């Protein structure tokens, strides 16, 4: 099974996507399974992991309902409010659904990323680490320092860094992203999604070679067993097509085209991480 480990669906009239506005005309419309299906078929992608795009419990319910109707959805990464004392009840409710595979922590949206080090938040993540629950971490490169500290406090967390932690690709900066990602990769339960990179470059004028150093570093430190391809569709459309995004990895690292590596990058690792 070939898997796209990171994409989104949304319906505007649900009205819980506050970040979607007419100022982003490419994204300001409905994106549903029938819109993605032609791309999946073209690239022989059998299924996807759909990831939340709104910080509401209602959106997670919506995605789980959508998963019941679409055979291409292998799993749903939802959202929980870890600052709410009722987070365990929220989790138990979602976990009853067979396609609920984990949840995402939206560090990117936190005014102060050090909020993840508050005792109640650390305790919540320890609860999920003890249960080996998959957790996506959406973080921007300048927020990595508290994430490194968090993982030292919750060393057993089964986690994946979304979008290679959004390094500053547009200006070519590697440090301190490079060193901090090395610290994260030392935790054996941490994975990395090779996703969301084109939107960190100049949307209208990026070149393939700009991504090579970032991809090579992520692959080197996480290894072939802890990386996953994710298109980040439709967000990727701000800067590139599905064809361009899926073609980026082999252009930057030809060894990723080797059959055993392809199998891991495009399916086996996602299957292992999300317990599909």
Image: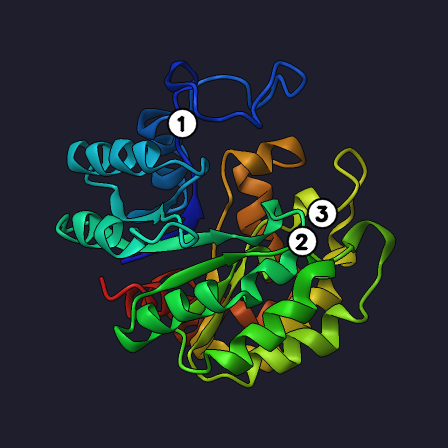
Q: Which residue is mark 1?
A: 10
Badge 3 crowding class, 10 Å Cα cut-off, few under 14, some 14 to 19, many 20 or more, is some
Q: Which residue is mark 2?
A: 112
SS state under label 2: loop
Residue at image position (31%, 38%) is 60
The tally of labels here is 3
- Nearer the observer: mark 2 or 3; the answer is 2
Q: Tell me the quadrant of the picture where the N terminus can be found.
A: bottom left
- Give the CA distance from mark 1 to mark 3: 22 Å
Labels 1 and 3: the sequence-earlier one = 1
- Name the mark on residue 119: none
Name above or below for residue 72 compared with residue 124.
above
Q: In the rendered view, does 42 fall on the left or right side of 231?
A: left
- Give the CA distance from mark 1 to mark 2: 27 Å
Residue at image position (21%, 48%) is 94
Disc 1, disc 2: CB below 8 Å? no
Labels 2 and 3: the sequence-earlier one = 2
- Give the CA distance from mark 2 to mark 3: 21 Å
Q: Which residue is mark 3?
A: 200
Labels 1 and 2: the sequence-earlier one = 1
| Relative depth, front residue between 6 and 135 | 135
Residue at image position (19%, 40%) is 71
């Amino acid at each position: 099974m070939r898997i796209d480990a990171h994409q989104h669906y949304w319906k505007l009239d649900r009205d819980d996507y506050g970040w979607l506005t007419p100022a982003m005309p490419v994204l300001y419309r409905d994106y549903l399974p029938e819109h993605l299906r032609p791309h999946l078929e073209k690239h022989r992608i059998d299924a996807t992991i759909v990831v939340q795009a709104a910080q509401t419990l209602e959106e997670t319910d919506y995605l789980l309902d959508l998963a019941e109707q679409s055979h291409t959805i292998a799993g749903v990464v939802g959202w929980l409010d870890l600052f709410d004392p009722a987070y365990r009840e929220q989790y138990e409710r979602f976990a009853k659904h067979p396609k609920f595979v984990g949840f995402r922590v939206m560090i990117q949206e936190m005014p102060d990323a050090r909020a993840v080090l508050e005792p109640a938040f650390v305790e919540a993540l320890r609860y999920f680490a003890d249960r080996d629950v998959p957790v996506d971490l959406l973080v921007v490169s300048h927020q990595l320092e508290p994430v490194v500290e968090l993982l030292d406090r919750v060393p057993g967390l089964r986690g994946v860094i979304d979008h290679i932690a959004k390094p500053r690709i547009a200006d070519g900066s590697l440090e301190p992203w490079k060193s901090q990602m090395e610290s994260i990769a030392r935790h054996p339960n941490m994975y990395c999604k090779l996703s969301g990179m084109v939107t960190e470059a100049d949307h209208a004028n990026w070149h393939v070679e700009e991504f090579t150093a970032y991809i090579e570093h992520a692959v080197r430190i996480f290894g072939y067993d802890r990386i996953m391809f994710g298109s980040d569709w439709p967000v990727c459309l701000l800067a590139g097509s599905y064809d361009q995004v899926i073609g980026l990895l082999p252009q930057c690292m030809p060894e990723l085209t080797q059959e055993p590596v392809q199998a891991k990058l495009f399916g086996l690792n996602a299957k292992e991480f999300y317990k599909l």
